[in-house]
Structure formats: C-alpha cells, structure tokens
Image (tube, grey):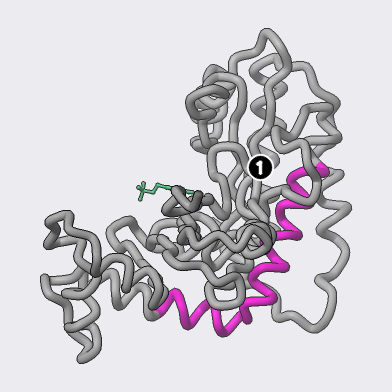
Amino acid sequence: AHQIKAVMVVHNETSTGATSRIGEVRAAMDRAKHPALLMVDTISGLASADFRFDEWKVDVAVSCSQKGFMLPPGLGFNAVSDRARAVAKTNKMPRSFWDWEDMLKLNANGFFPYTPATNLLYGLREAIAMLLEEGLDEVFARHQRLAAATRAAVQHWGLEVLCQEPRDYSPVLTAVLMPPGHDADQFRQVVLDNYNMSLGSGLSKVAGKVFRIGHLGECNELTLMAALSGVEMGLRVAGVPHRAGGVDAAMALLEQPMPGNAPRHLAVVN
Ligand SMILES: *Cc1c(COP(=O)(O)O)cnc(C)c1O
C-alpha cells in the first residue's frame, strides 16, 4: 500500500561489526517498485568501506567527522537526493536549524547560515587530501586487510567474531564475543589499566558480552599489531581462556605484501 515512507539502513553497524549490503536493499526496493526513500547511516562506513550514493540511488545519507575521516567530532554531513529534497518541501513540520534548503542556498556560494566549525573544515580538507593521496580503493583494501588480520587473531585465540556471516564482516571494526562466564567490561578494564588501551564496549543486548577492536581511519599494520598485542596480553592477565599466538596469526597474514603497487600507509610509531 506504499505506506512506508522510508527504508532506513545502517551501512556499517558499529555496535555489532556487520556491514549491510545497501545495493541489495536498493535492488529489493526497485523490484517491489516501492517509492519509499532510502536513507542510510554511513557514519562509520564512509571513507572506510565503499559507499555509492548515486549508484545505489540513496536518497539521504548521514555521516560525520569522527570516524573514517579521522577528525574530532563536530561535523555532520548529509547527502540528499533531488527526490528527498522534493519530499522535504512538502513536509509541514516546522524547522530551522535542520532545514536543508537554508544550508544549500548559502553553501552554493561557499557559506553557511551559521558559523560552522571552521577549524574542523580545515581538518576535513586535509583528511580528504590524505584519503585521496592514498587512493580510495587502497584505503578500502587496507581496512579489509586489517580486519582480516584481526579475525585471524580472534580465531586463533579460539574466541568468536560476533558477526556470523562472512560476507558481512565489517572492515571497520571487529566485535569479539567473550567466553561464557567472563565479563567483557572487566576484561576491557584490565587492558585499560595495564596497557592504557581502550577497547570498545558491547552496547545494549551485547553489553558485557563483547568487546570491540576498531581498525579504521588512521590505522596501519603496526598500530593494529600493537592493539592485538594489548588484547592478547590482556586475555592472559585477565585469565580469559584462549590459545596463545593470535598475534602471530595476524602477523603471518600481514607479512604478505599488499597486492598491487599500493603505497604503504605511513607508519606511525608512538
Ligand atoms: C558513531 C555512530 C553513530 C553516532 O554518531 P554520533 O555523532 O555519536 O551521534 C551513529 N551511527 C553509527 C553507525 C555510528 O558508527
């Protein structure tokens, strides 16, 4: 009956470490000839996992500065299709700050209706330059590679990746299930206290059951190896049952050179 106004999908699901197949969602909507708008949260996906606003005919995409763009929080981005703009114009809900048209009118001349976070816009310009210098395909491949190395470590430890569907594994982060009887937050605290490394927590349903290893943005082989070492040492110190050597499993994978002539992402050694 075309009562559904919008289909809303999260591109990269940051709490579980699963990536949605947005193109397939679009294809299903097209098959059903459904006029709903397709709205995508690509907050942690954009600039880390391939996202195709035009090709997938996304109507509204939301992203921000503080994930794959490697910036502090403070900027939100929208991409809005002509169709979504037309629908918004028929919307009688009062709004001012959130009005796309006000923003677009001034953006056309390089201005904003309000004072923007100018400092972050300078940062964004540099972040985009860094991403394009490496090459987007190379950036996406780097994320896939670091994710694969992380999963190699997790599997070797005998722990379970929360995402059960291999083709939906997130290139951005990996959520890891704790063995039964072991609290993820206690484990995270041990890692924080001993190695000053903050692992992501489990959210809502999986609170206390999973911890999350981020491998997005300004992250390369060596920064990932440091993180995996912190996890493996933490597992031992916290007395969490596991098979030692996950770090070696990740190293074995990362010892293989990047395919092609991709420039190496600059190593940052702290
Ligand atoms: C981080 C994140 C958010 C939250 O963004 P805020 O700027 O904290 O509101 C929402 N969705 C996804 C998928 C995220 O990764």
Q: Within the magenta stretch, is there residue 146?
A: yes
The percent position of residue 260, horizontal first and vertical second, equals 83, 80
Q: Is residue 121 above or below residue 240?
A: below
Which element carries disc 1, helix, strand or loop? strand
Q: Which residue in the structure is indicated by mark 1?
A: 174
Magenta: main secondary structure equals helix
Relative side of 158 to 147, left or right: right
Relative side of 170 to 114, left or right: right
Callout 1: few (<14), some (14-19), or many (20+) C-alpha neighbours within 10 Å? many
Q: Is residue 11 visible?
A: yes
| Residue name at image x 24 percent, y 88 percent | 108
Q: Quadrant of residue 55?
A: bottom right
Q: Is residue 247 visible?
A: no
The percent position of residue 218, horizontal first and vertical second, equals 54, 62
Q: Is residue 193 above or below residue 139?
A: above
Identity of the amino acid at label 1?
Thr
Q: Within the magenta stretch, is there residue 268?
A: no
| Residue name at image x 54 percent, y 44 percent | 14
Q: Which residues are magenta?
A: 126-152
Q: Is residue 119 above or below residue 63?
A: below
Q: Quadrant of residue 21?
A: bottom right
Relative side of 260 to 96, left or right: right
